[in-house]
Amino acid sequence: MGPKSKKKDPNAPTLLPEDTYLRAKKLIELTKGQMKPPKGELTQEEWCIPPGFHSTPELKETIKFWQKCAIVQHTERGMKVPSRMKTLEDPSKCAKKTYPRKEVQDLFKFIKTMNKQATKRTGQFLKQLEKKEGKETKRETLLKQVKDVDELMNEELRNARKFVERQELFEKKYMIGSKLGEQGPKKNALILIEQSDIQMAWVDETKDEIVKFINGVIEPETETFNLALFSSSAVTTWCPQFQNKADPKKGLADSIKWLNKNFTAKSCAAQAWPPDWAAALHKFIAEGVALPWRIYLCCSRSPEGKSEEILELIASLRNSNDSPAKGEAVLPINIVAFDPSIVGNDDEKAFFTEVGGPQGSFLIDTSNEDLVALDKMLKAVQVKRKQLDKLNKKLDKMEDLSERVAEDRALLQTQIALNNMLSNDLELCDWALKNEAEPPPPDI
């Protein structure tokens, strides 16, 4: 065994920063070396140094310094900064005095014990904060989900509204009136309907437009009219010639009855597309036949491979016939096409615009497809609404801990500042014990 180390003199003068000594002595006086045990929720009363002691002159400035993370603002440059290891060699920043070694050892033991307790207490404050932060993070995540779903739902609603406005789905003039037109000729209105396997998909929409037109335009404005179906094999008419709407047997009601009976999905399925446009036109625009004042045409799309032929025929018929009455155009045609695939097709638009003539009109009825698209949009909104309700119910069960998290964070920051203060003073006491003051030289 090596020789025992020489026991150091308990009265040996030991250099220690004066402010460190005074703080330690004050803490011994105030705390008696005891830290208040926690009871349930940690508050400022459970700090390692209770708040009631923070205003004492020996502690006030130092605690403030460590609460600001050992940073002195320019506006507070007059603050008295506590001694630290990095300022030990600077007498202007660290005033040191000699104290008996035994006293410094007692201070070291006290601060070491208190620092150990403070480190444990810091961990308790941290654990309390992390527990609340975890719950609050879950709540904030849920709040973000609620916000995102709500924004998506509102965006889908806005898109649905814009879609309805753009497609004029619920416009009064189309809900009550007909796309075939709002005005009718004085007489001889011809309603011409394509009967084909393609038009079969829009039988109900076609009949709806025609019935609205008969009741809303023909009934109040036109004396005589006729209905006809044209297909690839035949042209079928309601009456052999234009019929008076007020006829007790063959009037408006009978025309609608005939339409419902003869224009069905089954009758359309039996007729191949395209229909014979030329046959339909020749049947009603021929020598010895009363010329229609206006034609109202319901069809799917332009006849494939025969568009130029039809345009030439219509131009020829217009040139070879006189106006049926003063001020009336020759063969104006109001057209409603039902095939949505022609939307945006410039060739189709050009064909139907020329068929309609200067006094005619052309519209594409996509209401069926539009309603299907709108239904999908609204179902997507419904899904978001259910999802939002579910998230809100979940949110209602979660406590708002935002304020308590902020409070706990402030408590932890102060506890860390107190812990750092004790750690710094412990380090200075340790330095003092390892670096004893040299004894003064003997008098000569």
Image (cartoon, helix red, strand yellow):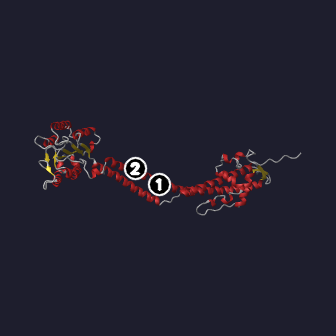
Residue 50 visible to an observer of this rendering: no
Asked if 278 appears above or below 386 in the picture, the reply is above
Residue under label 2, please give it.
155
Residue ranking furthest to the bottom = 39
- Say left or right for 203 vs 125: left
The residues bearing labels 1 and 2 have C-alpha atoms spaced at a distance of 18 Å
Q: 38 or 108, which is in the foreground?
A: 38
Query: What amino acid is found at the position of numbered circle 1 in the picture?
Result: Leu
Q: 67 or 230, which is in the foreground?
A: 230
Q: Secondary structure at mark 1?
A: helix
Asked if 299 appears above or below 106 in the picture, the reply is above
Name the disc covering residue 143, or none: 1
Residue 428 visible to an observer of this rendering: yes
Residue ranking furthest to the right = 444
Q: 9 or 275, which is in the foreground?
A: 275
Residue 204 picture location, percent across and down: 22, 51
- Say left or right for 38 vs 310: right
Please give the name of the residue rendered at 49% of the width and 54% of the height, measured from the top-left corner. Answer: 140
- Say left or right for 380 vs 211: right
Quarter occupied by the C terminus: top right
Residue 107 picture location, percent across and down: 73, 55
Asked if 39 appears above or below 406 in the picture, the reply is below
Q: Residues within 10 Å of mark 2 (few under 14, many from 20)?
A: few
Query: What amino acid is found at the position of numbered circle 2 in the picture?
Result: Glu
Asked if 356 appears above or below 99 in the picture, the reply is above
Tell which circle, 1 or 2, labels the residue nearer the N-terminal end: 1
